[in-house]
Amino acid sequence: MNYTKTNITDENIEMLKTLSHPIRVEIITILMKHNTLNVSELVNKLQTPQSTVSQHLSKMRGNIVGCDRRGLEVYYHISNPIVPKIIEILLPNNK
């Protein structure tokens, strides 16, 4: 069997590694449904401690999620249009 090198960029490989945690996938699926949420709203939907949610958001910030400050609140959204497509492939019944 011959091995053919793929054209997957290092950036995309890092993005897939970052998405490999179940809580991060859940955060993305919630943001796919609600577009923009703050940490408190994500904590309520995930039923997960605020520190855990913040830690996962911080790991995804930049290449997967973006954030906007509105007063004292920081709102998160999916910043990479490829991410919802990946989640839809992985979780086809999650629409």
Image (spheres, helix red, strand yellow):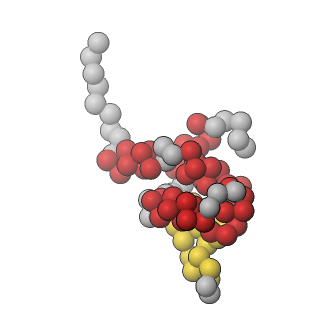
Residue pictured at 62% horizontal, 41% vertical: 88
Q: Is residue 7 left or right of residue 23?
A: left
In this view, the residue in front, 74 or 36, is 74
- Locate the N terminus by quadrant: top left
Picture coordinates of residue 20, whole percent (x, y): 48, 43
Picture coordinates of residue 14, whole percent (x, y): 37, 49
Q: Tell me where residue 95 sits by quadrant.
A: top right
Q: Is residue 10 visible?
A: yes
Q: Tell me where residue 42 sits by quadrant.
A: bottom right
In this view, which residue lies farthest toward the top? 1
Residue pictured at 70% horizontal, 67% vertical: 41
Residue 4 against residue 27 in the figure, above or below? above
Picture coordinates of residue 27, whole percent (x, y): 61, 55
In this view, the residue in front, 52 or 62, is 52
Q: Is residue 79 visible?
A: no
Q: Is residue 49 left or right of residue 56?
A: right
Q: Is residue 5 left or right of residue 51?
A: left
Residue 69 against residue 27 in the figure, above or below? below
In this view, which residue lies farthest toward the bottom? 71
Residue pictured at 72% horizontal, 62% vertical: 44
Picture coordinates of residue 2, whole percent (x, y): 27, 16
Q: Is residue 37 left or right of residue 17?
A: right
Residue 85 against residue 3 in the figure, above or below? below
Residue pictured at 62% horizontal, 61% vertical: 49
Count of numbered tags = 0
